[in-house]
Image: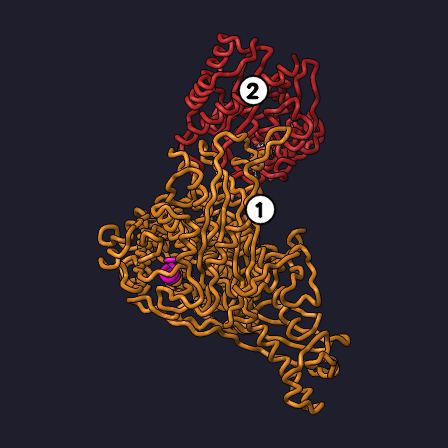
Amino acid sequence: MEFLRPATWEEALAVKAQHPSAVPIAGGTDVMVELNFDRRRPDALVDLNRIRELHEWRIEDDDTVRLGASVPYARIIEALHDRLPGLSLGARTVGSPQIRNRGSVGGNLGGASPAGDAHPPLLASGATVEAASVRGTRLIPIDDFYLGVKRNALEPDELIRAVHIPSATGPQQFAKIGTRNAMVIAVCSFAVALHPHTRDVRTGIGSAAPTPRRAREAEEFIRAELDESGLWTSGGELPRAAARRFGELVAGAAAPIDDVRGSAAYRRHALAVLARRTLLWTWNDHRATGRAAA
Amino acid sequence: MAGPTTPRNLSAVSAPGRDGIGASPPRPDGILKVKGDFAYASDLWHEDMLWGTTLRSPHARARIRSVDVSAALALPGVYAVLTHEDIPGSKFYGLEIADQPVLAIDEVRFHGEPIAIVAADHPETARRAVARIVVDYDVSPAIGPVEALDPERYGHVHAPADYKAHASGNIVHSQHVHHGDGDSAEVRARADVIVRGEYEVGMQDQAFLGPESGLAVPAEDGGIDLYIATQWLHVDRQQMCPVLALPPEKVRLTLAGVGGAFGGREDISMQVHACLLAQYTGKPVKIVYNREESFFGHVHRHPATMVFEHGATRDGRLVFVRAEIVLDGGAYASSSPAVVGNAASLGIGPYVIPNASIDATAVYTNNPPCGAMRGFGAVQMCFGYESQMDRLAAELGMDPVKLRRLNAMEQGSVLPTGQVVDAPAPVAELLRRVEAMPLPAAAYRRTGDGVDLRELPGGVSNSTHGEGVVRGIGYGVGIKNVGFSEGFDDYSTARVRLEVINGAPVALVHTAMAEVGQGGVTVHAQIVRTELGVDLVTIAPADTRVGSAGSTSASRQTYMTGGAVKSAAEAVRGTVLARGRRRHGWTPDLVAGLRLVDGKVVDRADAVVADLVDLLGDEPVDETVEFRHRPTQAFDRLTGQGFGHVQYTFCAHRAVVDVDVELGLVKVVELAAAQDVGKAMNPLAVLGQIHGGSTQGLGLAVMEEIVVAEGRVRNPSFTDYLIPTILDTPPMPVDVLELADPHAPYGLRGAGEAPTLSATPAIVAAIRAATGLALNRVPVRPEHLTGI
Ligand SMILES: Cc1cc2nc3c(=O)[nH]c(=O)nc-3n(C[C@H](O)[C@H](O)[C@H](O)COP(=O)(O)OP(=O)(O)OC[C@H]3O[C@@H](n4cnc5c(N)ncnc54)[C@H](O)[C@@H]3O)c2cc1C
């Protein structure tokens, strides 16, 4: 097996163009497991760890966070929890401290596992994936990124350079189910983000369908509900029935399976509960901060 | 209750005096392990060594039509590919019944059964070679525990001609215990209430962190030196010699660094495979399993289905118990017979019940073989009988702890086997103590920032901020035997040598005891310091050059090899004092009062009568002693009567849980324990055993299970076989009693297993209290709690 170590981003793209079958390795927390268990025997690895910019992030003029693909979860939690509260909550649930020190959003996207914890918050915040190759750069909306179980929209010669995530303009939440209280793969997960400026609510479902996905019907329902009842203006309490209906619609948007981690029926049930709870947390947060600002 | 004591200041690592018994000197492996410097068996290395790997069956039950190894042999770097045809000696092994093929012969009986072994110059080459072996299988439906009971219809796991156990059909072993008038109609009529329950325990794994590994080195004399992580060097050798066709003196074992055991290393795994490959190639061969293979490489805890009926009078006195237990033994016998013996004899728990009828049976199935695991047959039963005690308390409208204390056994009580308990049995006192401990704060804390997620069910997964969270409290108490039972000749050997080195007296302790993390080596040094009054104690590596120390299991090593070290040290002292008598003309009366303290011989008045260094001179004293516990008896095959167990040990738990009843997630808030250890030889180590055992019980209660479907293991990884993390492990206050057992060295009582028993039912009782659900199966899953 060849071990390629490009020193710059341009070199990395050239290497990937030359060896489209080479597997990129960032934190290695997925790749090394696959190698150790003999699930994957690539002819070459492209080590991205010498490329500094992948470990950096910056705030763009429009307040978007441009997050380098390899920034580890631990740094996101530490430095970006205010701007990216949903992703930080997701990051906080990833593995153990060791995994959070190495694992990255770029790696989560590269693997595109339906259980990846970065995906629901990225869906809910409306992120964009910056993919590049020697042929040029593409900005892939997150909604178009996940194609199937562990399949994403990258071309064989492309690498993820960064993820563009709008800074939160309202409360965001992420919650997941695992059968122990830490270091557990999601049985299912859910993210919700309020976007008060656009009066929008976006969602993300994890581990309950072949790909991470949004619960569009639930989003439409709650958008209409908030509009029609004037709650964005009044800042009133969200009727529990509306939260419950939202939960049901989220559960309905899932396509879960029975597996060793949990049953499909439980996953649906749990999604309904998580969606209801997280929506109420975000709405109550929004009301509290809105009032504080007034 | 005379003077039970609770050790205090456990954080003080160094002890008053000289780190003798009762002190908590640090363990020699502790810092090394924390820093990653400890050499485990998987770190073994030898110049020119080969790597061994194993081809395992992907099917639970199949005939093997053919095995073609030619493509594997053709791979450059491959030195050997062996099947059962290449075995020089016996093709079978087993702890109690030699029914397990070293390598499969014409058929496989469980998913993961070894079929062929390969040695190559690189582990990757060996793995590739294994992938090139072509096996033609004729697959049949797997026989599970239900089908096993009807061999006429579903067939035999071992064809009648090949059956080697002592019953028939698919039965490995069964034991009936008849006590009083059993459950006769007349007895039943005496009970005002009868509660019936069916319970199930899933397959738990030992989940030790250091996978199976060892290094076999061929020797010039045609023998083999094996460096190995195991629980019992001598019984490994006993099983290997016939296979290798070598006499015992040519198979020499040395203990390598062991990364946990919990029963999973009592059977041999890769030992004999590594030796066969070394014998065949004439080269050192190392085998180390990865995590996935480890799940296939060792036995697990027996899954159990249990039906109980408890009858009691209106005022809460137990009248009778009827219990029917079926244990899934898997494809081979392993220690199933002894597990059945424990289940039957300990099946009613630590209670006085005048009448009992118990049937325990282990069956052969096409599931993974099950054998020893911490608690050994007593764990499953404890979940059953403690669940029943709660059910009965509810039926009677009685406090569950009160009901338990009312029926608790004590010293002098008669067990259903007819054995009279002739040592302290403070069951009621343990319950009283654990109940009297202060309860943890009412609920998770709300701070300025909201809630601390780590205190809630779901933890940092952020699934609740308090919604749906209900608290529950539950209790459990259990009884476990210590040491090997049922007439087994259970002994340990220790050699102690005392000599002068660089002007100071130094003791050497040599045993074959497997240090698997329990802290035996620390305790051995403490015993020698106490008995011989020396500071410097060296522990020699454990190997087969000294006699057997028995297994590091059954909570027996501090009692047994500790007892042997004590006896050997006493023999050394006797020889030293005899020397003084000859040399200085000490009177027998003087000698009778002499002790060894701080390198001196002192009399009753603490006056120094001689210096140990002078007495020893340049003549070392070297004594080897075999230590036995009181003999036990086999249980009568028909009635289960007999003095079957040498010692009993008890632990009680109180569990406090918060359950998110909507999501079915559990947070164990606190797990308090009270245990009698007879004598806390090393209080810090005792605490570690109780914490560790309780945590393993917690794992069984809420998460740990090897999921097997039609004989196939579905979760052989730490991704999906979950064990508790630190966030799942609650504060565990411990109250330790020290009521001496007059029959045991220093009055001590084996401590390692009892806490594993009662933690599980206490936690499940607490979850029942929070949810109102019946919960008849462990581990409890979110699906059970949400009814989905
Ligand atoms: C013990 C343990 C616990 C875990 N727990 C969780 C958990 O709770 N939640 C969770 O979501 N995940 C978990 N994981 C999985 C893993 O940590 C995450 O998926 C992590 O985000 C991977 O990041 P990485 O940088 O280590 O990726 P790597 O392993 O380096 O790469 C992962 C994949 O992405 C590709 N890749 C990496 N960088 C790029 C790039 N710049 N462009 C294109 N492709 C790229 C790689 O080729 C590979 O296919 C766990 C893993 C372990 C070992």
Looking at the image, in which quadrant does ligand 1 appear?
Answer: top right
Q: Quadrant of the N terminus of chain A?
A: top right
**Secondary structure category for the residue under label 1:** loop
The residue at the far right in this view is B503
Left or right: where B521 falls relative to B489:
right
**Closer to the camera in the image, B276 or B633:** B633
Query: Which hue is chain A drawn in?
Result: red
The tag on residue A178 is none
Q: Is mark 2 within 8 Å of ligand 1?
A: no
Residue A216, given in percent of the width and then of the height, sits at 47, 16
Residue holding disc 1: B731
**Secondary structure category for the residue under label 2:** helix
Residue B721, given in percent of the width and then of the height, sits at 48, 44
**Closer to the camera in the image, A128 or B264:** B264
How is the structure coloured here? by chain
The residues colored magenta run: B340-349
Residue A212, given in percent of the width and then of the height, sits at 50, 25
- Most common SS among magenta residues: helix
Residue B712, given in percent of the width and then of the height, sits at 39, 45
Res B766 quadrant in image: top left
Left or right: where B242 falls relative to B451:
left
Q: Which chain hosts label 2?
A: A
Kindly tell me whether residue B78 is visible in this rendering. Answer: no
Q: Which chain hosts label 1?
A: B
The tag on residue A284 is 2
Q: Tag 1: Cα neighbours inside 10 Å, few (<14), some, or many (≥20)? A: few
Kindly tell me whether residue B259 is visible in this rendering. Answer: yes
What is the three-letter code of the residue carrying label 1? Pro
Q: Residue at x 48, y 61 (%)?
A: B426
Asked if the stretch drawn in magenta spans residue B564, the answer is no
Query: Which hue is chain B drawn in?
Result: orange
